Image (cartoon, rainbow, N blue to C red):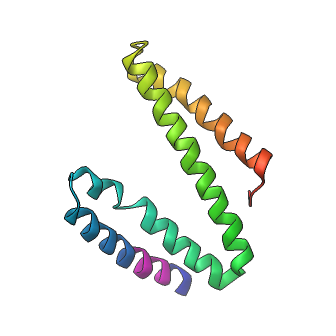
């Protein structure tokens, strides 16, 4: 129960800090970008360090980095499929999901991680 309370408080605090930071930056689209994912990742890594040690948190952070790289590749694939090939949104996202899976699991298999 205390783990969930710590996650809630730490996540809320970090989300608030990132939201304030995002609100101060220009363009305002940064506010949404900085709103959730980095703050949740930091809270999760903080709890991982406390519960499992720094080696576990380091491995978890690498898997987060792999996921971020895979998301960037997914986003580029969706943009390419929508703008250049002119696919609809559903087929583009489904096809790009295959790209995300390939990149994420390729990085995980090739470079290792905590999966």
Residue furthest front in the image? 26
Quarter in which the N terminus is drawn: bottom right
Camera sees residue 1: no
x, y percent for residue 16? 30, 73
* Image quadrant where residue 90 sits: top left
* x 53%, y 28%: residue: 96
Camera sees residue 9: yes
* Image quadrant where residue 32 sits: bottom left
x, y percent for residue 45? 58, 73
**Is 2 included in the stretch rendered in magenta?**
no
57 or 93, which lies in front? 57
* x 78%, y 54%: residue: 112
Helix, strand or loop: magenta stretch: helix
* x 44%, y 59%: residue: 37
For residue 93, above or below residue 49: above
- Which segment is the magenta one? 5-11
Query: In the rendered view, does 33 fall on the left or right side of 68?
Result: left
x, y percent for residue 111? 77, 50
How many marks do you count on the picture?
0
2 or 99, which lies in front? 99
Query: In the rendered view, does 52 fall on the left or right side of 80?
Result: right
* Image quadrant where residue 95 sits: top right
Quarter in which the C terminus is drawn: bottom right
**Is 9 included in the stretch rendered in magenta?**
yes
């Amino acid at each position: 129960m205390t783990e969930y309370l710590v996650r809630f408080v730490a996540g809320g605090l970090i989300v608030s800090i990132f939201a304030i930071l995002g609100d101060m930056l220009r363009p305002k689209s940064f506010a949404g970008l900085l709103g959730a994912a980095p703050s949740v990742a930091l809270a999760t890594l903080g709890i991982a360090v406390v519960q499992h040690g720094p080696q576990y948190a380091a491995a978890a952070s690498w898997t987060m980095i792999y996921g971020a790289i895979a998301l960037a590749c997914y986003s580029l694939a969706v943009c390419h499929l929508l703008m250049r090939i002119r696919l609809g949104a559903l087929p583009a996202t489904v096809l790009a999901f295959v790209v995300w899976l390939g990149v994420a699991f390729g990085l995980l298999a090739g470079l290792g991680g905590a999966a």
